[in-house]
Amino acid sequence: MNRFRSTRSLQKFAAIQSSIHNRFNLERHFYSRSDFKENRTQALFEWRQLAA
């Protein structure tokens, strides 16, 4: 928290960070390597569409 000037900016950062984490957190230990790569590719494709 020392790097944030206010709790509001910290909360804003945490909200954005958690939504990004939820998008890319695919719980890899539950998937085979091929399934993980396929899901990761799809997540990156969606992220690029949202960011464009």
Image (tube, rainbow, N blue to C red):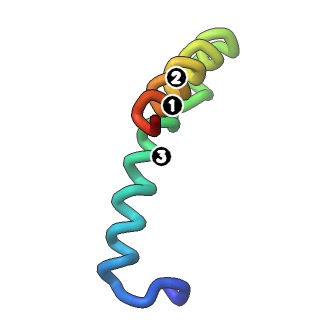
Counting residues from the N terminus, which is met first, the one under dot 1 or under dot 3?
3
Identify the residue shown where x is 38% and y is 47%. 19
Q: Position of residue 48 (x, y in %)?
A: 51, 31
Identify the residue shown where x is 67% and y is 10%. 34
Counting residues from the N terminus, which is met first, the one under dot 3 or under dot 2?
3
Q: Which residue is mark 1?
A: 48
Q: Which residue is mark 2?
A: 45
Asked which quadrant contains residue 41, the reply is top right
Marks 3 and 2, how far apart in space?
16 Å
Q: Position of residue 12 (x, y in %)?
A: 34, 68
Asked which quadrant contains residue 36, the reply is top right
In the image, farthest residue toward the top: 34
Q: Which residue is mark 3?
A: 21
Q: Are marks 2 and 1 in contact (CB under 8 Å)?
A: yes
Q: Position of residue 46 (x, y in %)?
A: 45, 25
* In front of the other: 48 or 5: 48
